[in-house]
Image: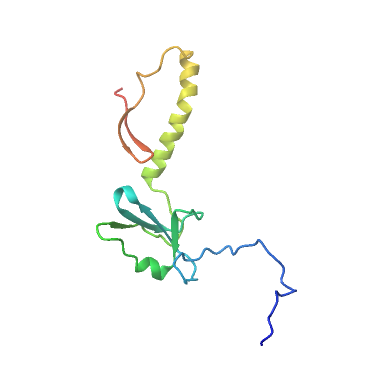
Amino acid sequence: MGSRRGPLKSAVPSNIVSPVRRCSRTACGRPAVATLTYVYADSTAVLGPLATYAEPHCYDLCAEHSERLTAPRGWEVVRLSDASGPARPSGDDLEALANAVREAARPQERAAQSGGKNGGRNGDPVEVGRRGHLRVLRSPES
């Protein structure tokens, strides 16, 4: 009978996990470069740049597996650009951010100007559409 090896005496238990995220595919140990998310309501698989942090409902994929990705029959695959450099905000993104900041500051301005009595609805922009968490606003007529 062969001898049975016990645990290594020099091994030190560690809670440190590698900072490199790995591909979620079975038996693939390559570094992840993209994140796959399924949108079941729309029958869509969205493949985009590696997410900021790992989430349980998303799958990290290496370059090879992200290139070969196929979706189930009847599903659409949406591939978001994976700009290799840091993403630069577009003019629309910056304008939306500026509008959100202005809107967030408005309730304090209204309360200070009207004393909180008049709802202040006369000069407010009108919401004409919505896309995700962003709203499309029409400026009030001057």
Please give the name of the residue rendered at 33% of the width and 50% of the height, measured from the top-left corner. Answer: 40
Task: Residue 67: give x, y in percent of width and height.
Answer: 36, 68
Residue at screen point 43% across, 39% down: 97
Q: Position of residue 109 (x, y in %)?
A: 48, 22
62 vs 76, left or right, is right
| 5 relative to 18, above or below | below
Which picture quadrant has residue 94?
top left
Residue situated furthest bottom in the rendering? 1
Q: Specify whether 127 is left or right of 105.
A: left
Quarter residue 58 falls in: bottom left
Residue 68 point in image, percent of width and height: 34, 69
Picture mark count: 0
The correct choice, above or below, for 56 with respect to 99 in the image is below
Q: Nearer the viewer, residue 29 or 64?
A: 29
Residue 48 is situated, as x and y percent measured from the top left of the image, at: 39, 57
Asked whether 132 or 126 is in front, the reply is: 132
Residue positioned most to the right: 9
- The quarter of the picture where residue 49 lies is bottom left
Q: Quadrant of the image for the N terminus?
A: bottom right
In the rendered view, how is the structure colored? rainbow
Q: Is residue 11 left or right of residue 103?
A: right
Specify the farthest residue to the front: 1
Name which residue lies at 48% across and 18% down. Answer: 111
* Residue closer to the observer: 79 or 106: 79
* Quarter of the C terminus within the rendering: top left
